Image: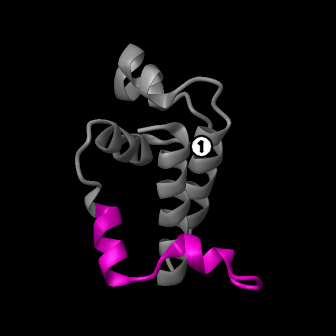
Amino acid sequence: MANQEIAKILYEMAELYEMEGVLFKPQAYEKAALGVEALDREIREIYKEGGAGALLNIPGVGKGIAYHIETLLRGSKFAEYEKLKKKIPVNISELTAVEGVG
């Protein structure tokens, strides 16, 4: 999974949590997404070299989000993401592309 794909999921998590009215998590996921986008290397390579611990060196990525990124890199389902998508069945990309929304 490429950096942009992971960043997109993290941004979607931020939006979904915001729609849920959850405090703090939207900002945390957005910061992590920005950190992933800013990487000058592929996140998969960082993970291969240093495991989950190396993900903590990405600006904005804490233990919880590092675990979720590791889950994505291993090709497993990101259960929290799937749960929120089922709860709020909207296409975040399309919604945020509408002028004046998002």
Q: Mark 1 sits on what residue?
A: 60
Which type of secondary structure does the marked residue at label 1 adopt?
loop
**In screen coordinates, is 101 left or right of 89?**
right
- The C terminus: image quadrant: bottom right
Residue 21: image location, x then y, percent: 52, 82
- Amino acid type at image mark 1: Gly
Residue 79 appearing in the image: yes
Question: Along the line of sight, which residue is nearer the eye, 56 or 12?
Answer: 12
Give the residue drawn at x 30%, y 78%. 86
Residue 23 appearing in the image: no
Seen as rendered, the residue at the extreme right is: 100
Q: Start and end of the magenta stretch?
A: 80-102
Residue 91: image location, x then y, percent: 48, 76
Give the residue drawn at x 53%, y 55%. 8
Give the residue drawn at x 40%, y 24%. 47
Residue 75: image location, x then y, percent: 26, 41
